[in-house]
Amino acid sequence: MRGAAYAICLSGVVEREALRWLNQRGRFVSALVRPLVWLAIFAAGFHFVLGVSIIPPYETYIPYEVYIAPGLVAMILLFNGMQSSLSMVYDREMGSMKTLLISPFPRWFLLVAKLLAGVFVSMVQAYIFLAIAWFWDITPPWAGYLAALPALLLSGLMLGALGLVLSSFIRQLENFAGVMNFVIFPMFFTSSALYPLWRVREASLPVYWLSEINPFTHATELIRFALYEKFAPLSALVVAGYLVLFVILAVWGYDPGRGLMARRAGGE
Amino acid sequence: MVSGLSHAFGKRRVLDGVSLTVRPGSFTVLLGLNGAGKTTLFALITRLYHAREGRIAVFGHDIKHEPAPALARMGVVFQQPTLDLDLTVEQNLRYHAALHGMPRRLARARLLEELTRIGLEGRRRDKVRQLSGGQRRRVELARALLHHPSLLLLDEPTVGLDLASRHFLLEHVRSLCRAQGIGVLWATHLIDEVGEDADIIVLHQGRVVASGRPSALLERTGAPDLRRAFALLTGMENAENREEG
């Protein structure tokens, strides 16, 4: 297969993901409403409870809403990453996944294409959220929006790859509620999305260390710093490392010689 | 094409030493009851996963070592529906064309051609959700043919369809065999889908228990018709008698 054919395949996969997203109004709206609810209700409630001192990348005291906005952006990526990967598992018994995998392109390429398609949709959503958040006085510098682009891409890929890994290894993931309880919520709450980690350390050291190794923490920090035109090298490294690890595991899980497809069919 | 194929899920042996060949231009019916191993066989041929033992070759290309040229010449209609209900017919087909690396202009020409052939060109901007079950199946067939495969695999394609749709699908695929020389592997448990001109492969509990032309099967079993021959081969003759009695 030549390069042009690869490009056609990739754009086809991205186009389908975008069309599906536009057509599923429910998914579209709920993906946007979820972080807005957190911003409008949760953040408003905690506005006076949690004071955030001056910590990088911020250069002044900031309201709580401003603090949690990057975490909510990362939350969009997390939810979408899980949803687009796991939808392959329970969407009509993997029908759409079969369609994808019988394409003559190499399987690793198909999985990466699928991943990129999901991330593309997530990033559009993240920017829509940021646009709305602007009216809540969450106003990073203009260049920050641009600087956030690679951070969103890297974080989105990492979280999407995690979803792929889960979809290939965990057989009992029959519904999204299980993923919410055992993956999304624990990752979200043991991260720096809702509260700065120095506060967590004061409260509980084990939780602090869990948060430090949590990839979601570093995705959040990478986005937070980028939004304020700063670079978080450690977070970038950790996110990239997890991305490589998850991609390797996903390709392994979807290998025709082992992993998901055979075991899943055996359970049918 | 398939030789010495065995596969097991855990301890349960699903396919046991299966060998079969689909000749170019032949309409080959894979006949078996539910649970005979038809769907597993299809999954192995389409490389959804590898078999534990045995070899699968498509036009000389081993599916394990040269999957790309093998898959490029294969068209598949799976048992479960695999169209995106919220996308239009055209969008579904365009997606498939992209998965085969087909340039946009070529894809457009091909999809019009295939949709015209199944009589649905007027519905191409409709969402799949608005189509009937029979029409959806026809679209899946058109999709499987979009990249002009030389081998067409269909896994129980008529399940849940009314008589007219079944008839249309069957005739359409038969005519493809005759006119374009496409080799077809048609899995079913419905004996009346076997025509006079078909090659039959009877799969029972993971083994090929008989194969050949309908006339050869009748001769071998001494049965008066195919239904009885199939019942004899799969050890169902008692059930069959009870049903009739």
Image (tube, coloured by chain):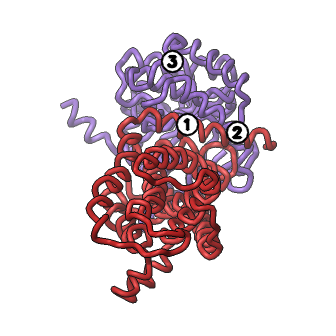
Say if A176 sits above or below A182 in the image: above
Give residue A39's position: percent from left, percent from top. Answer: 35, 55
Q: Which image quadrant: the C terminus of chain B?
A: top left
Instruction: Count residues near mark 2 (Cα–Cα under 10 Å), then give few for <14, some for 14-19, many for 20+.
Output: many
Q: Nearer the viewer, residue B168 or B205?
A: B168
For disc 1, the chain is A
Disc 1 is placed on an element classified as helix
Residue receiving disc 1: A16
Residue B139 placement (x, y as % from top left) = 51, 24
Q: Is residue B31 above or below residue A231?
A: above
Residue B72's label in the rendered image is 2
**Three-letter residue code for mark 3:** Arg
Q: Earlier in the sequence, mark 3 or mark 2?
A: 2
Judge by depth and name the residue closer to the eye, B132 or A13.
A13
Colour used to depict chain B in the structure image: purple
The residues tagged by marks 1 and 3 sit, at their Cα atoms, a distance apart of 15 Å
Query: Which residue: 57% across, 44% down?
Result: A100
User: Which label number is shown at residue B125?
Assistant: 3
The residue shown at (51%, 10%) is B122
Question: In the image, what residue type sits under mark 1?
Answer: Arg
| Tag 1–tag 3 contact (CB < 8 Å) | no
> What chain is tagged by disc 2?
B
Name the secondary structure under disc 3: loop
